[in-house]
Amino acid sequence: MTKQCENPLDNPKCKEVVKTDRYYLCRSCGMYGKKFTNEHKKLISKSRINGWKAGEYESAKKIWSTMRSGKNNPMYGKKHTDVTRKLMSENHADISGENNSRYGKTYEEIYGISKAIAIKEKLKIANLNKSRSIESRKKQANTIIQKKYNIGYDEYLDTLSDRDKYYKMVHNITKQQPIHLLENYDKRGRADMDDKAYHLDHKISISYGFYNNISPEEIGDISNLRFIYWKDNIIKQGENYYEQS
């Protein structure tokens, strides 16, 4: 590959000088108007992947992230068309679903326990005081169920028992609550990773609510939620907790 000409505006050898966003190019310079061979593209890709794994792009990643965040991102406020999404899906078929090396794996299996904890902590902070709407969750569930069972979400709900429908409604409502305001939220975790972890508990159990015709809205409301030590949550096993007045 030839090097970029110096001073293309003043260089008599440069032909058809073109102005870009940052500099001038001529058709006889660099890769302007040319294409890499497939073999060359593979070599470049391999080199960049190895460099990425070796941590050579850490500073560049921060710059790229800043340059392409928010309104600086070319897709900001835009959506891909159905045709584009279909093409993207087809182009990534070889690395999506079960073909993906990370399919069915946990953060711990992918990154190791220490890094997984750090990632989850960052996600917890990033999602603090945020909650997705029921409509958004339903849309995601519809996509998953459509791929897995080839039926729509509403049709899937019709296959569930009344009890399962009730539990699903309670869980959806629970996910809408600002649980970060609850005492011991900062101790929330997985029992298999932290013996001191706390779990989210429904004071009046979901099972009790179903069999006693209590509305899902009442059972899933934040007033019925608390964080308790994970072993206590297991021992509770559907029993109710009543606060003393």
Image: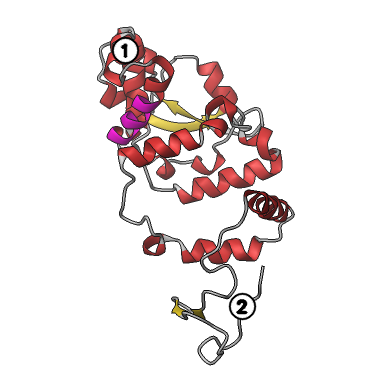
Question: Closer to the camera, 12 or 57?
Answer: 12
Disc 1: CA contacts within 10 A as few (<14), some (14-19) or many (>=20) = some
* Residue stretch rendered in magenta on the structure: 135-143
Image x and y of residue 172, in percent: 34, 28
Taking the spot 67% from the left edge, 67% from the top edge, the residue there is 1
Question: Closer to the camera, 119 or 189?
Answer: 119
| Majority SS type along the magenta span | helix
Task: Find out whether residue 207 is within the magenta segment.
Answer: no
Taking the image as drawn, is residue 19 in sight?
yes
Taking the spot 47% from the left edge, 81% from the top edge, the residue there is 17
> On the image, which quarter does residue 214 sit in?
top left
What kind of residue is marked 1?
A: Phe
Element under disc 1: helix
Image x and y of residue 11, in percent: 56, 89
Image x and y of residue 140, in percent: 37, 31
What kind of residue is marked 2?
A: Gln
Whether residue 235 sits left or right of residue 238 in the image: it is: right
Image x and y of residue 221, in percent: 31, 31
Q: Can you say which quadrant of the picture contains the C terminus?
A: top left
Question: Which residue is most to the bottom?
Answer: 10
Q: Which residue is mark 2?
A: 4
